[in-house]
Image (tube, helix red, strand yellow):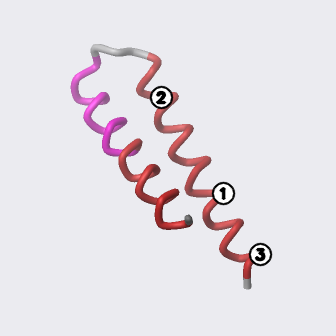
Amino acid sequence: MNSLLYIIAVILIIGWAIGVFFTTVGGLIHILLVIAVIALLLGVIRRSTAI
């Protein structure tokens, strides 16, 4: 499950990076970045408490 969370985070970060260079969507790009960062933080928090 943790690997799935990281895959989703990486996809969202790539989408954000593409959106920054092709700024046609506007605020949606920054929402993708925030969701990716939250997903990464949740993955780190869940991993550290699982030990």
Q: Which residues are magenta?
A: 13-23
Q: Which tag is nearer the camera, tag 2 or tag 3?
A: 3
Say which quarter of the image contains residue 12. Answer: top left
Which residue position holds label 3?
A: 49
Which residue position holds label 1?
A: 42
Q: Position of residue 21 (x, y in %)?
A: 23, 29
Q: Residue at the spot x=55%, y=48% of the render?
A: 37
Label 2: state its secondary structure: helix
Q: Say whether marks 1 and 3 touch (CB < 8 Å).
A: no
Question: Which amino acid lies under the numbered mark 2 shown in the image of this protein?
Answer: His
Q: Say whether marks 2 and 3 touch (CB < 8 Å).
A: no
Question: Which amino acid lies under the numbered mark 3 shown in the image of this protein?
Answer: Thr
Say if 47 sits above or below 31 in the image.
below
Q: Position of residue 19 (x, y in %)?
A: 30, 28
Reading the chain from its start, which is encountered first: label 2 or label 3?
A: 2
Q: Position of residue 32 (x, y in %)?
A: 47, 33
> How many residues crowd around disc 1 within 10 Å: few (fewer than 14), some, or many (20 or more)?
some
Reading the chain from its start, which is encountered first: label 1 or label 2?
A: 2
- The dominant secondary structure in magenta is helix
Question: Which amino acid lies under the numbered mark 1 shown in the image of this protein?
Answer: Leu
Q: Residue at the spot x=66%, y=57% of the render?
A: 42
Measured Cα–Cα span from mark 1 to mark 2: 18 Å
Label 1: state its secondary structure: helix
Which residue position holds label 2?
A: 30
> How many residues crowd around disc 2 within 10 Å: few (fewer than 14), some, or many (20 or more)?
some
Residue 17 lies in magenta, yes or no?
A: yes
